[in-house]
Amino acid sequence: MSNEQDNTQNKQRIDRYRRKLLGGSAALAGAAALGSGVFFTSIARAKPDAEPASSEVRWGFLIDTNKCVDNCDKCVTACNDEFNLTGFGRPETDAQWIRTVTLRDKKTGHTTRLPLMCQHCAYPPCVDVCPTGASFKRPDGIVLVDKHICIGCRYCMMACPYKARSFVHETIENQKEYGPRGKGTVESCTLCVHRVDKDRIPACAEACPEKAILFGNMNDAGSEIAQRMASEASTEIRGDLRLNLGVRYQGI
Amino acid sequence: MQSTQSLYCFSLRPLRLRELCVRYSVITGALVLMFFSFTAAAGVPVPDIPDAIKGEQCVEETGFMRRNHMKLLSHQRDDTVHLGIRTQKHSLKNCFTCHVVTGANNQPVTVKDPRHFCRECHDYAAVQIDCFQCHTSVPGGRKTTGARP
Ligand code: SF4
Ligand code: SF4
């Protein structure tokens, strides 16, 4: 296929995306309330397939724990479905890319519930310790494992302060075409990089009925996430480690 | 000087090692060729390469693809994983999507089935494919028919 054809296809894709947005599809109904200025910015940022991820972008989550309701695990289910993360009846070692954590203040008894996944650190300890270069950070801040290189030593699992990574112990079948997984390698939340590269939001953020998980480009002052980060208080889990996290929480 | 040397080549003196090697490799080559033409005649199955469903030319010229598809795949793989470049042209997905083989219930066959596009040649050449330890081998990553009964 020639470049020209590639470009036309991309244009068509962006046009489709634009029509979908203006049509106000259910998933984006929330975004429509933001006013046109915001969404034209995001259209302008639609990344063509042939273009590499940009370091001007920093993808991240802003998670409002006040909205996270007890006994709900829709984000976890959505993640498991997205990547076909099936269990083998061994919860100690079964893959877990996102989990819900309940914190209890011992003094007051107040509990807080939150979804926890890879925090996509700007200074990721997993990358620091990886002996092969398999753990790496994309220019746009997404931390990934290149499973073609990973030797399964699991140093990164030991280094991660958030226990965000899993090791695949079993032979895996029926992988999704966008989510290769295999025995002997380490894996973790990819921030749904396959969706993000196609201008879609991660599966957990899409699935949350309470809109507790907000995804966006933290570096874009016009984005909802950046505006909310500027106007509302939010914090990092174990901010004392100074890892500059891509996931920020409210209400903890 | 030149002429004397060329004369030596055909003399009956003991052959030097290099010459021996050359001569033997020619003989071995001839034997191997004879063996292959013999076995082919005896019916070793030649790859039956599934046509592209689109019925078009492959993304590159066929001879080039035969020799270099693995280089294109590795290159694309690094670009996609590390940089997020998601062009389809040289992707693994494109290979088995275009050359999909359907089995029972009109479902695409996985790499467990010897009729799978990648396996046709890889079996013949006895080259193991590691890609599908992690990657799906069917379009859409659907549940599949498995091995041929
Ligand atoms: S949260 Fe853990 S796995 Fe994710 S980037 Fe940080 S150290 Fe690495
Ligand atoms: S398990 Fe893989 S990604 Fe983790 S440190 Fe070892 S080689 Fe790197």
Image (cartoon, coloured by chain):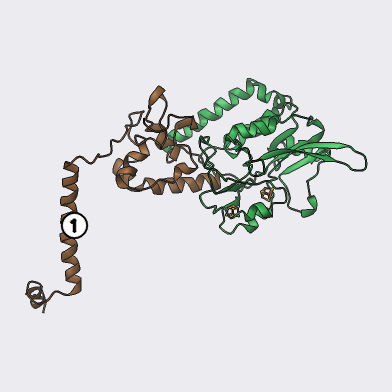
Chain colours: A green, B brown
Please name whichever residue, A17 or B32, is drawn nearer the observer in this view of the structure. B32
Instruction: Tell me if B38 is positioned left or right of A67 in this view.
Output: left
Residue A72, x across and y down, in percent: 74, 29
* Residue in the picture at 32% in, 42% down: B121
* Total marks placed: 1
Instruction: Tell me if A104 is positioned left or right of A141 in this view.
Output: right
**Looking at numbered disc 1 in the image, what kind of residue is underneath it?**
Gly
Q: Quadrant of residue A54?
A: top right
Which residue is labeled 1 in the image?
B29
Residue B37, x across and y down, in percent: 17, 46
Q: Is B39 located above or below residue A17 in the figure?
A: below
* Residue in the picture at 46% in, 37% down: B88
Position of the C terminus of chain A, as image quadrant, is top right
Question: Which structural element holds mark 1?
Answer: helix
* Residue in the picture at 55% in, 38% down: A179
Within 10 Å of the Cα at label 1, are there few (<14), some (14-19), or many (20+) other Cα atoms?
A: few
Residue A1 at least partly seen: no
Instruction: Tell me if B143 is positioned left or right of A31 in this view.
Output: left
